[in-house]
Amino acid sequence: MSKFLLTSKNRDIAVQIASLLNLGRQLLYGQTEWSILQNPITYVIEMSGEQVAGVIGIEVKNQQVSELKHLCVHPDHRQKGIGFKLVKKGIEYSTTTFVYGTVRADNAISIQNTLKAGLRPVAKHRSRGCEIIVFASRRDNTNNGSHVKGAQGH
């Protein structure tokens, strides 16, 4: 494994990403091949052979801020560290100074992976009946953008 790709306009990959994101039924709207190909989100994917094993999206909000979103690992590939690797790659591939993402407060594994990857909690709010934690960081460009500082106190 550990073959990470930034998505291009590959229809087969878009179908797999949409299917994977729809498995968890956590998104407000179901995803389709078309929605994946047309939205402004760049997806970082980990492949296992020809199958998408995991995915995380990067959406540039403005020149300074990117959002990590839609982290999802296929059930056949969970508990192998893929979620953590995807969060790290998402931060690494972000082109902005600040990176943030949200995690449901009841998702202990995603919280652990997000903290381990270097993002820190900066806010909480409620959405659709769930408590949501906002994690953020400021990228340190002295290491080609690959080093992250926690947002609190920086």
Image (cartoon, helix red, strand yellow):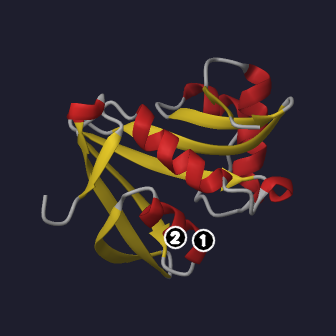
- Residue name at image x 75 percent, y 28 percent: 13
Residue nearer the viewer, 31 or 107 = 107
Residue 43's x, y, as percent?
Answer: 57, 34
Asked if residue 75 is positioned above or below residue 42 in the image, the reply reads: below
Q: Quadrant of the C terminus?
A: bottom left
Residue 97's x, y, as percent?
Answer: 23, 39
Asked if residue 27 is positioned above or below residue 9 in the image, the reply reads: below
Q: Residue furthest front?
A: 143
Q: Residue furthest top?
A: 9
- Residue name at image x 22 percent, y 59 percent: 151
Left/right placement of residue 47 relative to residue 86 reads: right
Q: Quadrant of the N terminus?
A: top right
Q: How many marks?
A: 2
Left/right placement of residue 41 relative to residue 120 reads: right
The residues bearing labels 1 and 2 have C-alpha atoms spaced at a distance of 5 Å
Residue nearer the viewer, 68 or 118 = 118
Left/right placement of residue 107 relative to residue 48 reads: left
Which residue has dot 1 on it?
109
Q: Residue furthest left?
A: 153
Asked if residue 13 is positioned above or below residue 71 in the image, the reply reads: above
Asked if residue 22 is positioned above or below residue 66 in the image, the reply reads: below
Residue 41's x, y, as percent?
Answer: 49, 34
* SS at mark 1 in the image: helix
Q: Amino acid at mark 1?
A: Ile
Q: Give neighbour class at mark 2: few <14, some 14-19, many 20+ (Cα, 10 Å).
A: few
Residue 112 circle label: 2
Q: Give neighbour class at mark 1: few <14, some 14-19, many 20+ (Cα, 10 Å).
A: few
Whether residue 29 is visible, yes or no, is no
* SS at mark 2 in the image: helix
Q: Amino acid at mark 2?
A: Gln
Q: CB atoms at circles 1 and 2 under 8 Å apart?
A: yes
Q: Quadrant of residue 91?
A: top left
